[in-house]
Image (cartoon, rainbow, N blue to C red):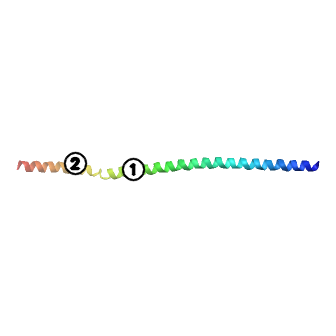
Amino acid sequence: MVTDVTVLALSSNETAWWITLAAGLVVAGVVWALLERLRRAVRQVEEAAAAAWAGGKQVEANTIMTYLLKSTRVRGGELAEELDHHRRS
């Protein structure tokens, strides 16, 4: 009878190990899925940030010479005066 109890104890212990192993694999799978979801979200954020950076650089390139508008207006006025002078002559 002692042998039957020992076999039963080993069997229960082995079953507990298999259950623990299965639970560990399930947890590992869930952790992997969550990390993959996080990686994809980070990639989307990086792509959006890169697009915003590129757009900002384009805006900067298009507006870098706006400080010249004041002098352009002044020189345009001077040119108009000069043209008026030549038309009268």
Dot 1 crowding, Cα within 10 Å, few <14, some 14–19, many 20+? few
* Residue in the picture at 22% in, 48% down: 73
Q: Which residue is mark 2?
A: 73
Question: How many numbered circles does the render carry?
Answer: 2
- Residue 12 appears at what percent x and percent y? 83, 47
The kind of residue tagged 1 is: Gly
- Viewer-closest of 21 and 73: 21
- Residue 39 appears at what percent x and percent y? 56, 50
Indicate left or right for 57 with 72 as reference: right
As drawn, the label of residue 19 is none
Mark pair 1, 2: CA separation:
27 Å
Comparing labels 1 and 2, the label whose residue is closer to the camera:
1
Which mark is first along the chain, 2 or 1? 1
* Residue in the picture at 32% in, 52% down: 64
Q: Which residue is mark 1?
A: 56
The kind of residue tagged 2 is: Arg
- Viewer-closest of 60 and 49: 49
- Residue 1 appears at what percent x and percent y? 94, 48
- Residue 47 appears at what percent x and percent y? 47, 50
